[in-house]
């Protein structure tokens, strides 16, 4: 597959990698100095991950805790900045530890430069982390 050419295409590709549980492939989409932010992070959860290595460490155990099946209702909005998109979506699947359904609504502001993710502000729902089996961050909540 050739490299995605637009931020929207790269983002769609990143979702396919998450569905395939290919975390190393997903991390490879990031710039070395990429920044991932969680403005609504609850206490004990990271608010900011600086650099590809920190993002990789955060995502390493994701598939052990959340098995994603689909991203329905994906909407990608272009912005006046050609390198930035705003994404609305749901992630659905199951929590591995309990078998319970996983259904999370996301809004993300994503910037891509030179074919790599450089900034990702993830406005996910912090109330969902009250479910057993969702904490894959290694935090000590």
Image (spheres, rainbow, N blue to C red):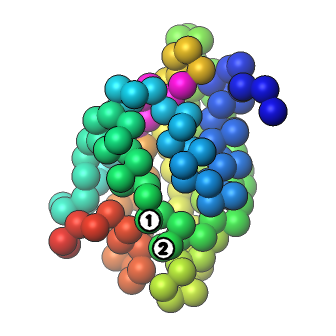
Residue placed furthest toward the right: 1
Residue 120 vertical position relative to residue 61 in the rendered view, above or below = above
In which image quadrant can residue 86 be found?
Answer: top right
Residue 2 vertical position relative to residue 123 in the rendered view, above or below = above
The foreground one among 29 and 120 is 29
How dense is the environment of label 2, judged by Cα within 10 Å: few (below 14), some, or many (20 and up)?
some
Q: Residue at x 43, y 55 (%)?
A: 59
Q: Which secondary structure type mostly characterizes the magenta part of the structure?
A: strand
Q: Secondary structure at mark 1?
A: loop
Q: Secondary structure at mark 2?
A: helix
| Residue 65 badge | 2
Q: Residue at x 57, y 44 (%)?
A: 26
The residue wearing badge 1 is: 61
Between marks 2 and 1, how big is the CA–CA gap? 7 Å
Residue placed furthest toward the bottom: 98
How dense is the environment of label 1, judged by Cα within 10 Å: few (below 14), some, or many (20 and up)?
some
For discs 2 and 1, the disc positioned in front in the rendered view: 1
Point out residue 119 in the picture as x, y percentages from the top left corner. Answer: 42, 28
Q: Is residue 90 visible?
A: no
Q: Residue at x 30, y 50 (%)?
A: 40
Segment tinted magenta in the rendering: 116-121
The foreground one among 51 and 103 is 51
Report if the CB atoms under discs 2 and 1 are less than 8 Å apart: yes
Point out residue 110 in the picture as x, y percentages from the top left corner. Answer: 50, 30
**Magenta stretch: residue 118 in it?**
yes
Q: Residue at x 39, y 83 (%)?
A: 132
């Amino acid at each position: 597959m050739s490299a995605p050419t637009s931020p929207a295409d790269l983002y769609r590709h990143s979702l396919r990698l998450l569905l395939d549980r290919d975390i190393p492939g997903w991390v490879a989409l990031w710039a070395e100095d990429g920044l991932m932010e969680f403005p609504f992070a609850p206490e004990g959860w990271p608010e900011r991950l600086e650099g590809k290595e920190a993002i990789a460490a955060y995502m390493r155990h994701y598939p052990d805790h959340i098995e994603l099946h689909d991203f329905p209702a994906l909407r990608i909005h272009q912005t006046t900045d050609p390198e930035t998109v705003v994404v609305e979506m749901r992630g659905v699947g199951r929590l591995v530890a309990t078998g319970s359904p996983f259904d999370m609504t996301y809004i993300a502001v994503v910037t891509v430069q030179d074919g790599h993710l450089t900034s990702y502000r993830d406005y996910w729902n912090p109330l969902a982390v009250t479910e057993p089996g969702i904490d894959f961050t290694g935090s000590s909540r």
